Image: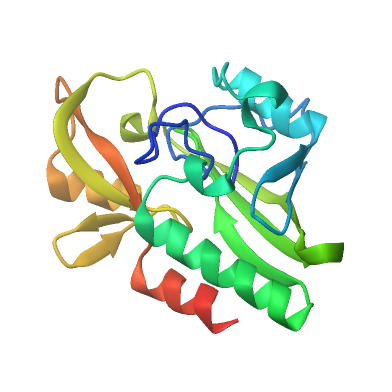
C-alpha cells in the first residue's frame, strides 16, 4: 500500500492503496516504505521514503501535515480493500503476531512484486512495512498510465495482484486490454479498486 494521487476514496481523499497507475523509478529510491497507525487507526508516522515516493508520483497533497492524525480509512479506495485491511488489523491486534502478505504495485512499464508486513505495536498500534521484492520490465501498458485520457467507464483492478476483472474472470492486464479491445483507443476506462476472490481468500485466511 503506497501513496498515490489518482484514485480518490469515497471520502474524497487521495487513496493510499497502491495504484496501478503509478510511475516511479525502480532505482535511486528506497525499496522499503514504513508507516504506523495507533489504536484508533490514525496515521501517526510515515517515513522519508514514503513521502519521497508520494512526491515523485505527483501526490503533492500527501505531506506529513496533511495526513498525520487522520484515519487511515479515509485514504482507502474501494470498500472491499478497506474490509480486508480492517480484518488484518483486527487479527494483528488480537493475536499480537505479525502478518506478511505478497502484493503488486505495478507501473505502466514494470511489474513490481512487493511484500507487506503488519506488526503489532504497544497499546494497539500497528507498524506497516512494504518491501520491494522484484521488479520485472514489460512493454508499456497505457491503461496503467496516469497521463492518458479517461472515459466515464470503469474497470475493476485487484488491489493485491493487479489483475483486471473482465466479466466473471480476473485477467493479467495485458490479456484484459486485448479482451476489452483497448488497443489504439482515444480514451481508457477509469480504474476502480477491489480485490479478486483468490487474493481475498489468501489475505483473510492468514
What percent of the width, then of the height, locates residue 87? 54, 72
Image position of 153 with respect to 194: above or below? above
Question: Number of labelled discs?
Answer: 0
- Residue 73 place in picture, x, y as percent: 51, 49
Taking the spot 35% from the left edge, 66% from the top edge, the residue there is 196
**Residue at horizontal 53 percent and vertical 65 percent from the top:** 86
Going by the image, does 55 lie left or right of 161?
right
Q: Does residue 120 appear in this view?
A: no
Give me the residue at 61% from left, 63% from top.
Answer: 102
Left/right placement of residue 157 relative to residue 135 reads: left
Please tell me in which quadrant of the rendered image residue 26 appears.
top right
Across and down, in percent, residue 108 comes to 44, 33
Tell me if I can see residue 177 in this picture: yes
Residue 192, relative to residue 79: is it above or below? above
In terms of depth relative to the viewer, which is nearer, 13 or 171? Answer: 13
* Quarter where residue 178 is shown: top left
User: In the image, is residue 9 above or below residue 82?
Assistant: above
Q: Quadrant of the C terminus?
A: bottom right
Q: Quick one: 144 or 190, which is closer to the camera?
A: 190
Residue shown at 58%/46% (left/top)? 72
Residue 100 in the image, given as x and y percentages of width and height: 69, 69
Left or right of residue 115: residue 182: left
Q: Quadrant of residue 96?
A: bottom right
Comparing 105 with 181, the one in front is 105
**Vertical relation: 16 (above or below) 168:** above
- In the figure, is residue 52 to the left or right of 171? right
Amino acid at each position: 500500500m503506497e501513496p498515490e494521487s489518482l484514485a480518490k476514496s469515497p471520502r474524497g481523499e487521495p487513496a493510499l492503496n497502491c495504484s496501478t497507475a503509478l510511475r516511479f523509478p525502480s532505482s535511486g529510491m528506497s525499496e522499503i516504505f514504513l508507516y504506523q497507525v495507533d489504536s484508533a487507526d490514525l496515521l501517526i508516522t510515515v517515513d522519508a521514503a514514503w513521502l519521497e515516493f508520494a512526491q515523485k508520483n505527483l501526490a503533492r497533497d500527501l505531506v506529513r501535515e496533511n495526513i498525520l492524525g487522520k484515519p487511515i480509512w479515509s485514504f482507502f479506495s474501494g470498500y472491499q480493500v478497506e474490509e480486508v485491511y480492517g480484518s488484518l488489523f483486527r487479527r494483528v491486534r488480537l493475536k499480537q503476531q505479525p502478518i506478511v502478505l505478497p502484493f503488486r504495485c505495478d507501473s505502466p512499464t514494470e511489474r513490481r512484486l512487493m511484500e507487506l508486513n503488519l506488526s503489532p505495536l504497544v497499546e494497539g498500534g500497528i507498524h506497516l512495512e512494504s518491501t520491494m521484492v522484484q521488479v520485472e520490465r514489460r512493454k508499456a501498458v497505457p491503461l496503467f498510465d496516469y497521463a492518458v485520457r479517461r472515459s466515464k467507464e470503469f474497470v475493476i483492478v485487484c488491489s493485491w495482484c493487479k489483475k483486471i476483472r473482465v466479466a466473471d474472470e480476473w485477467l493479467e492486464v495485458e490479456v484484459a486490454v486485448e479482451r476489452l479491445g483497448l488497443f489504439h483507443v482515444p480514451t481508457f476506462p477509469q480504474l476502480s479498486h477491489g480485490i479478486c476472490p483468490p487474493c481475498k481468500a489468501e489475505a483473510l485466511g492468514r
